[in-house]
Image (cartoon, helix red, strand yellow):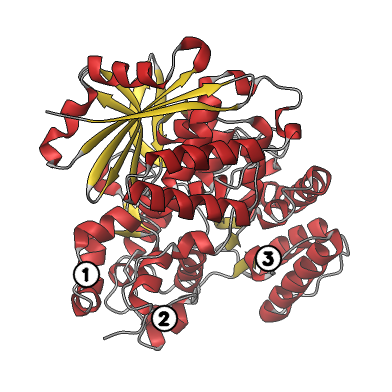
Amino acid sequence: MKKLPIGISSFEKIINENYVYIDKTKHIDQLVNKGAGRYFLSRPRRFGKSLLIDTIKHAFEGNKALFKGLHLENYWDWQTIYPVIHLNLGISSSYHSKERFFTEVHSMLDEHAKKYGVVLKQTDYGVKFGELIRLLHEKHPQGIVVLVDEYDKPILDNITSNELAMQMREILKGLYTYIKQNDECIKFTMLTGVSKFSKVSLFSDLNNLDDITLDAKYADICGYNQAELVETFNEHLQQGKVNYDLLRRWYNGYNFAGSEKQKVYNPFDILLFISKDFHYRNYWFETATPTFLVKMVQKNRYFIPDFESVVVNEHLLRTFDVDNMPIETLLFQTGYLTIKEMFLRGHVIAYRLSYPNYEVKYSLNNSLATIATNDSKKNQVIDHMISAFERNDFERLGEIICSHFASIPHDWYRNNHIDQYEGFYASIVYSFLAALGYDLIAEDVTNHGRIDLTLVMPDKVMIIEFKLQKYGDAKEAVAQIKSRQYAQKYESYNKPIYLIGMSFDDKQRNISDLYVEKYEC
C-alpha cells in the first residue's frame, strides 16, 4: 500500500516517494485552459490548499514526469515553461510582528531573484515585488505565474488584536496591489486563504480575481469526495473493517456548492484516522482550538442552537473583514459551518448552513461549553451529566444544571438582559448536551411543531422543552410535549422515551424546577 502523506504538501515528494495522491489535476486543466487565469480560493485550514498550489507550480515549470498517469499529462502544453513566483505565507509559524513579515517576504523575493538570475534594487517590499514581476517578464515574454498560498495568514495570526490585524491588512495591500498593477505581465494568478478579507486591495475590484470558493465546478478541488475515498483508500479502510456510514457521519459533509453529491472529507481527518488505527477522534479540530471564536460567541451572546440551521444570503458569506466579522461568515470560512442547501430567497441566492459532521458539532460545542466557566468546571459538568443521563437520575441532573448556573459570574450578565430570555438557558444547556457525545437535535421538527431539544442515546430518547417560570413551570413544559405529540416521531426507535421539562427563573438566573415523565405509547 502507498504511504499516507500526513502533513506533506510537496507534490514532488508525494509522487516520487510513493505517497497516496488523489488526482485533482482535472481542475487545473479547467482553471488554466478554460478560464480567465485570475483566481481566488478560500478553504478551511488543513484542506489541501498548499498541495494544490504546489501542483500548479510544477505544471507551469514543465515537470511533466511528475504527472505521468494523471489527467493533466495529456491536457497541458509541456513545451512552454513559465517562471513561477510562489509566495507561501503559510511557511512561517506566526506573524506576530510586522518585522517578521517583512523579513519573510524579502527573503522569498530574494530567493526567486536568485533562482531566475535577476537583480533586485528596490528596498520597499511591495515595490520590490513589482520589480521582480517586471524583470521576469522581460526575460520571459510568454508571461509569468504568481501563486500566493495562505495570503491572509498575517491577518489571521493577529485576529485577536484588532489594531495589529488592521495594520497587517494594510501591509498586505501594499504587497498585493502590485499583482494588479502588473497584470499585463502575468499569465496566471491564484491566491488561496482561509478568509476573504474584503478590504484587501485584491478584492476591491470584483473583476480582478475570479472567486471560485462557491463555484460548483470546483466544489471538490480540495478534499476527498466519496468516490475518491473509496477508490483510493479502500484497501486501507478494509484493513480496519471500517463502516463507511459511520465514517461519513464523523468526517464527511463539507460542502462548498450546495449539492449533496459534492460533499467532501477533510483530508487531514482521513489520513489521521487511518494512521491512528481507525479510532474516531476530532483530529482536524484538535489542530487549532477556536479560542477567538469562543470569545466572540461569549461577547455577543449568540444563541448557540441556531448554529444547527443558519440562513444567510450570498453577500453575507462573502463579507468579512477585521472590523466587520459576522459570526455566520466566520464560522463558514473557518470550516465550523458548511452549506447544507442553496436556494433562492426572493431574487437573491441564499444558503442554509449547519455543522458539516459529528466531529465539528461535538468538538465545537465542547469548546463553547467553556462559556461563563472554565475547562475544569466544564469537564466536571459534562462527566456528571453523562452519569446522570445514563442512570436516569433526573434529580441529580437538575442539581448539576442548578450548580452550573449558580457558578456563572455576575459580570457575565452585565450590560445586557440575556438572562430574561428562554434562549439564554437553552443555549447553555445545549452546548453541554452537544458535548456529551450523543446525537442532539435542536429545534427538532415534527408534524405538530418544533421540539426545543432531542437527545438520542443508545438506549433511550430524551425530549426536552424549556420554559421561563413566568410563562409556565416544568410540568407545563411536559404537558406541551404531550399535547403536541412530539414523542410520536421517535416511537419507531423502539427505545424508552422520556419527556423532560425545564423551567428557569430569570430573577434567580437559575433552573427553578425540572419534571420528567416516561412516555407511554
Residue 242's disc is: 1
- Number of other residues with Cα within 10 Å of mark 1, as a class: few under 14, some 14 to 19, many 20 or more: some
Q: Secondary structure at mark 1?
A: loop
Q: Nearer the viewer, residue 507 or 425?
A: 507
**At x 75% / y 46%, what residue is drawn?**
169
Q: Residue at x 31, y 73 (%)?
A: 278
Q: 412 above or below 110?
A: above
Query: Can you say which quadrant of the picture contains the N terminus?
Result: bottom left
* Tag nearer the camera, 2 or 3: 2
As drawn, 92 above or below 66:
above
Q: CA distance from mark 1 to mark 2?
A: 25 Å
Residue that carries the numbered disc 2 in the rendered image: 14
Q: Which residue is tagged 3?
A: 138
**Which residue type does callout 1 highlight?**
Val
User: 10 Å neighbourhood of mark 3: few (<14), some, or many (≥20)?
Assistant: few
Residue at x 30% of width, y 84% of height = 2
Dot 3 amino acid type: Glu
Q: Is residue 308 left or right of residue 470?
A: left
